[in-house]
């Protein structure tokens, strides 16, 4: 009797979910997501009230303020699952058990990523939209494309970091080392982003920001909605205010980078990784 | 079957964790923004008065609640409308005002009859311009004193409470069946 094709994939997925989200990891992270989502909106509440000119910019600022800390918590969960979890699988040899399944390597990686990223992402987005509908149902319903664009722009960077971390984990094959390198990479890019923003503010040259917007497309959207001036006289140098379509181009560019990084990871896992 | 029970149980436990966080948020009190505004009005029979609690250009966002306290010696109808003050005609009869508000039904955020002392709280679902109309439909002159303040909160308490009311029973049932099956399993193991 022929075995159903989906079964090994589901077995690996179930095993990965069991490993990544042991009780009470899922519950603790759900609690942290929910509480940080609301608390951050409160802190930004006065700010939103004073700067939001139109309901469209209110929708954007609501999403961007609400997303701040939960996005960082999402990254921590991804770091744990991808860098530490997958790295440990390679280090301890657990991955060999998975490779024994009658399934192609790229499907094994897909099951692992679905568990590590898919569930974390579903939980993150689920709580975010739930909170948005609790706080401002009308604003969210009226400006759904803006809300979705804001999430797409903000998630591109964490997904890129995850793909790079996955590659690092496969290369070093050690959970702890991969985690440390992932954290170093995250802070290095954060510092680079700060330096590029300061460069723009001090020189009035928008090129550093445009480079940053490819890696972090949320920058383009942020500058589209909130005009951040330079220290140079406003009369001489114009501030960078990308149009909405320009911001969308940066988002598309960002996801091309993400897709490329994942493709390299899949190729490496399928063809180059010797286990 | 066991896997399905575990999956549903974990979903239930996650819902309970979310309810716990919402419950904690409910305990955080609201904070008053700015200074409360007070005023008093004399309303002729079948007349109305237009008030702009936040000023003519200001808007109310979903993170804020407008708290209004009224004292009156008669019965008044309070309307909170999402319209700029200049769009509301000033010299209509009470009947014509009612027709006008019926035409603009989509902009009427709140309608409430008040008598003696009443407190009304309103939290918008989106960004709204708030203009208040006090309507006296009685045959004698009414005097009304009002006080208004804007409260900032983590999230609208009524909506938070509603979410907890709906989510927590679902979470309890889902997590409960999982715990029950786990206990049964342990008993069976200990017996064998």
Image (cartoon, rainbow, N blue to C red):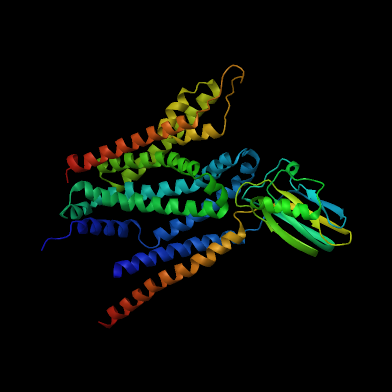
Q: Position of residue B49 (x, y in %)?
A: 81, 51
Q: Residue at x 48, y 41 (%)?
A: A150
Q: Position of residue A26 (x, y in %)?
A: 40, 58
Which quadrant would residue A52 be assigned to in this image? top right
Q: Residue at x 37, y 47 (%)?
A: A79
Q: Is residue B12 left or right of residue A13?
A: right
Residue A9, can we see it? Answer: yes
Q: Residue at x 87, y 62 (%)?
A: B139
Residue B19 vs A66, above or below: the answer is below
**Is the C terminus of chain B in the top left, top right, bottom left or bottom right quadrant?**
bottom left
**Is the N terminus of chain B in the top left, top right, bottom left or bottom right quadrant?**
bottom left
Q: Position of residue A18 (x, y in %)?
A: 31, 60
Which quadrant would residue B129 be assigned to in this image? top right
Q: Is residue B24 left or right of residue B40?
A: left
Residue B186 vs A256, above or below: the answer is below
Frontmost residue, A187 versus B137: B137
Residue A88, can we see it? Answer: no
Q: Is residue A239 left or right of residue B113?
A: left
- Give the residue at the far left of this rendering: A1
Q: Residue at x 21, y 59 (%)?
A: A7
């Amino acid at each position: 009797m022929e075995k159903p094709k989906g079964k090994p994939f589901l077995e690996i997925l179930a095993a990965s979910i069991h490993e990544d989200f042991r009780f009470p990891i899922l519950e603790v992270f759900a609690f942290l997501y929910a509480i940080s989502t609301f608390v951050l909106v409160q802190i930004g509440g006065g700010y939103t009230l004073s700067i939001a000119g139109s309901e469209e910019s209110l929708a954007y600022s609501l999403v961007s303020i609400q997303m701040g800390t939960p996005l960082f918590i999402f990254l921590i969960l991804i770091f744990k699952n991808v860098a530490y979890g997958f790295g440990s699988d390679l280090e301890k040899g657990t991955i060999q058990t998975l490779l024994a399944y009658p399934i192609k390597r790229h499907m094994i990686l897909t099951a692992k990523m679905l568990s590590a990223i898919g569930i974390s992402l579903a939980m993150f987005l689920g709580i975010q939209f739930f909170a948005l509908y609790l706080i401002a149902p009308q604003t969210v319903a009226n400006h759904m494309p803006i809300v979705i664009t804001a999430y797409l722009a903000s998630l591109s960077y964490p997904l890129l970091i995850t793909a790079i971390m996955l590659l690092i984990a496969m290369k070093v094959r050690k959970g702890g080392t991969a985690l440390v390198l992932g954290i170093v990479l995250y802070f290095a890019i954060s510092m680079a982003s700060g330096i590029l923003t300061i460069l723009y503010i001090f020189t009035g040259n928008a090129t550093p920001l445009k480079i940053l917007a490819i890696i972090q497309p949320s920058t383009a959207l942020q500058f589209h909605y909130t005009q951040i001036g330079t220290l140079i006289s406003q009369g001489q140098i114009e501030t960078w205010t990308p149009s909405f379509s320009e911001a969308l181009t940066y988002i598309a560019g960002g996801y091309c980078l993400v897709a490329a990084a994942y493709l390299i990871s899949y190729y490496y896992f399928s063809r180059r990784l010797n286990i | 079957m066991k896997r399905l029970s575990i999956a549903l149980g974990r979903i239930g436990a996650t819902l309970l964790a979310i309810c716990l966080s919402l419950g904690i948020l409910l305990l955080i009190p609201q904070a008053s923004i700015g200074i409360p505004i007070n005023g008093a009005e004399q309303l002729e029979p079948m007349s109305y008065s237009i008030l702009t609690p936040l000023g003519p250009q200001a808007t109310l966002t979903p993170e804020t609640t407008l708290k209004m306290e009224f004292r009156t010696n008669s019965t008044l109808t309070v309307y909170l409308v999402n319209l700029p003050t200049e769009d509301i005609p000033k010299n209509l009869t009470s009947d014509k005002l009612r027709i006008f508000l019926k035409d603009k039904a989509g902009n009427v955020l709140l309608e409430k009859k008040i008598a003696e002392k009443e407190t009304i709280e309103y939290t918008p679902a989106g960004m709204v311009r708030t203009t208040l109309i006090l309507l006296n439909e009685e045959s004698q002159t009414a005097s009304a004193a009002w006080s208004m303040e804007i409260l900032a909160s983590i999230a609208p308490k009524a909506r938070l409470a509603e979410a907890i009311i709906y989510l927590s029973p679902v979470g309890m049932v889902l997590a409960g069946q999982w715990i029950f099956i786990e206990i049964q399993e342990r008993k069976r193991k200990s017996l064998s």
